[in-house]
Amino acid sequence: MNSHIISRRRFLNYAGVAGAVAGAAAVSGCTLGVAGDTHLTDSGRPSGLRALYATVEANAAAVQALLPAFREAFGFDLTLDTQPYNALQQKVFSELATRSPYYDIIIVDTPWAPTLTHVLEPMSQYLRNPKLNQLADPAINDFVPKAFYDAGVFKIDDPTSHYPEPEAVPNIDQITSKGFEVLGLPIQTNVLMMGYRKDIFDNPNEQAAFRQQHGRPLAVPETLDDLVTVGRFFTRPEQRLYGTTLTGGVGDWSTCDFKSYLAAFGGDGHMLTDDLHMAFDSPAGVQALQFMRDLVDKYNIVPPGSESASWDDTASMFDGGLTVMSSNYHTFELSDTVKGGEIAYAVVPKGSSRGPHFGSYMLSINKYSRFKEWAYQAITWITAANQQMTMVEQELHPTRTSVYNKAANDAHLTNKYGNFYGALGKSLNVGVGRPRLTNYTEVSHDIAVQVNNAVAGRVSPQAALTAAATDVRDTLRKADYTVPST
């Protein structure tokens, strides 16, 4: 197992804030700006807590809707400072690198977490303290296991390690006995899902034509073979209609598409093992890349330009009525030009296996906060089932099993979002997360470049994977990892 302890200098350099630390103290909220400010009331409560949160990606509107109820429950305010994704990442790293106590609660996306294990407060001592669990039961046994273990459970001094063989029901004693810690509670989880035009699938004329051609009913694809068959049936370029989409452009979107297909063909959807072997450079990886290429130039069921498409591009293609199916991480919304359209959702089609990409945000305690016990109680309250069920109204992607069970059977939510929450819960339960790396962004880029080369037909799938493996090894070594040669 590769042990990779992050030095302070390495942490600052990775965060991109090494040159900004001296000036950071002048920014409102940094250490010098709040020295001596205890923010305590006469009752021993803080006068308020501050949280750093993602504006859109983790659905800040859902949490903001809870703030009046938070004040009623705690007797003080939670101030939510929201930032767009790229600015948020830099802000999180800057705050923690300067040991600023300004934010008590910090939202962390899973790709960042391996770099932050030493600056987030371990939660096991709080989870075991009954006095700190009176405002809200943390009920970690109710979290979706995949979301809980992938987002929040880490080995602090060996952050590349995933928790081995997660229990069906999360248990704090089991976690700590294996040398792991809980560094946050999951708040928003995103998983690759398939959206499809229910109105087109349900059209009697389409159903009759498909049955005539294939001798079986038209149904939402369950397998990749079905995806090709149904996609070909609906692809009608003369009508500006295509079967499905593909995110083939250079970006984390193509890496995530590739890792989902890699898992579908029976490979390791993490792409890298915990001891840093290149699991994506494999027969399953070749099959995955070949299938992605075949969607473009053999089956011809994706729109022109898919070789360079991003998540936003494919969402626009589907929303504009250009495709009958598409895969993404959020609800779709058909444009006004698509008359009579209706959307439904399903788990992405499988090959020999299934493993759609997923990732979760977690709420963590700033290790330098002066109010860590209160921050913990705030986090357990926000992520509790009652609050998550309220936030589902604002389209939060919940992280608790009980909330999925309720949301999937709630008539009001079904009327508002269709079967989205039922499909989301099923997808999450079969999802596969990212490799745990302090430089995941760079590694993802190395893989994305070669995925794009293969999808665009510039190189063979095997050549692309060989090149990606060489690039990834070099990138990991530059980040001070010890990498196996093969």
Image: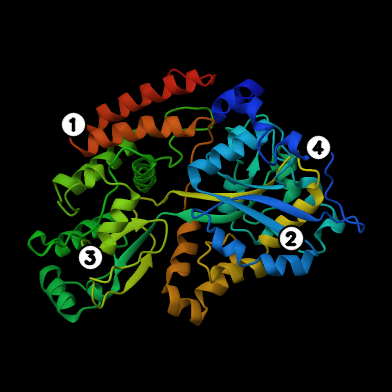
Callout 4 secondary element: loop
Q: Is residue 321 left or right of residue 135?
A: left
Residue underneath mark 1: 458
From the viewer's side, name the closer residue of 323 and 404.
323
| Labels 3 and 4: the sequence-earlier one | 4
Judged from the image, the secondary structure of the residue bearing numbered disc 1 is loop
- Residue sitting farthest toward the front: 26
Distance of mark 2 from mark 1, alpha carbons? 56 Å
Hey, what amino acid is under mark 3?
A: Gly
- The residue singled out by tag 2 in the image is 77
Horizontally, residue 233 falls left or right of residue 39, namely left
Secondary-structure class at tag 3: loop
Q: Earlier in the sequence, mark 2 or mark 1?
A: 2
Which badge, 2 or 4, is on the more N-terminal residue? 4
Position of the C terminus, as image quadrant, is top left
The kind of secondary structure element at disc 2 is: strand
Gap in Å between the C-alphas at discs 2 and 3?
44 Å
Residue type at the position of mark 1: Arg
Residue 321: mark in rendering = 3
Q: Could you tell me which residue is drawn at 42 percent across and 19 percent down?
A: 474
Q: Position of residue 224 (x, y in %)?
A: 28, 54
Look at the image and tell me whether residue 433 can be seen. Answer: no
- Foreground mark, 1 or 3? 3
**Quadrant housing residue 47:** bottom right
Q: To which residue does mark 4 refer? A: 35
Q: Is mark 1 in CB contact (under 8 Å) with mark 3?
A: no
Q: Residue at x 40, y 52 (%)?
A: 354
